[in-house]
Amino acid sequence: MHVLAISTVSDGDRFWSGLKKLYSRLPAGATWVLALADTGGVRAVNVIRHDSIDEIRAVFDEHVGSSAVTEYFEADAANAVGLGK
């Protein structure tokens, strides 16, 4: 499945440096598909291919913690454009 992690960032420096660390510490079998932000760096969308939303939530909490409020969803792959399989 594809996990969407949608964040509202309150501490940009901590959040973005945490994401850089998180990238090299993904759970086994996870693949980072996309990471992007608005021009102000306040809203971020990350798409990670993995079989557990809870594992993605745990690793995000460990590395970005209170620097953002993040919501996690399973992507609707059947209706996605450009997501791949």
Image (spheres, grey):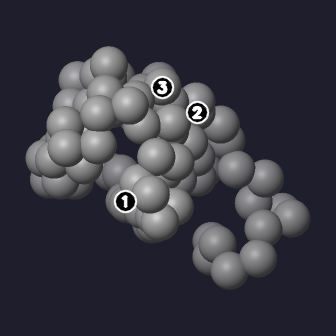
Which residue is at a point 32% across and 19% down the rendered structure image? 66
Q: Which mark is residue 5?
A: none
Instruction: Report the mark closest to the observer, 1 or 3.
Output: 3
Which residue is at a point 31% across and 27% down the rendered structure image? 67
Question: What residue is disc 2 on?
Answer: 72
| Residue at the extreme front | 40
Q: Amino acid at mark 2?
A: Tyr
Q: Secondary structure at mark 2?
A: strand
Q: Position of residue 31 (x, y in %)?
A: 37, 59
Label 1 – label 2 distance at C-alpha: 16 Å
Q: Answer yes or no: is residue 7 visible.
A: yes
Q: Which one is nearer the viewer's eye here, 54 or 4?
A: 4
Question: What residue is disc 3 on?
Answer: 69
Q: Earlier in the sequence, mark 1 or mark 2?
A: 1
Which residue is at a point 29% across and 22% down the rendered structure image? 65
Tell me if mark 1 has few (under 14), some (14-19) or many (20+) residues whose alpha carbon lies within 10 angstroms of its own. some
Q: Quadrant of residue 35?
A: bottom left
Tell me if mark 2 has few (under 14), some (14-19) or many (20+) residues whose alpha carbon lies within 10 angstroms of its own. some
Instruction: Report the mark closest to the observer, 1 or 2.
Output: 2
Tell me if mark 3 has few (under 14), some (14-19) or many (20+) residues whose alpha carbon lies within 10 angstroms of its own. some
Which residue is at a point 65% across and 37% down the rendered structure image? 73
Q: Amino acid at mark 3?
A: Val
Q: Quadrant of the C terminus?
A: bottom right
Above or below residue 47? Residue 66 is above
Q: Earlier in the sequence, mark 1 or mark 3?
A: 1
Label 2 – label 3 distance at C-alpha: 10 Å
Q: Secondary structure at mark 3?
A: strand
Q: Secondary structure at mark 1?
A: strand
Question: What residue is disc 1 on?
Answer: 31
Label 1 – label 3 distance at C-alpha: 22 Å
Q: Please say if the residues under marks 2 and 3 sit with CB atoms less than 8 Å apart.
A: no
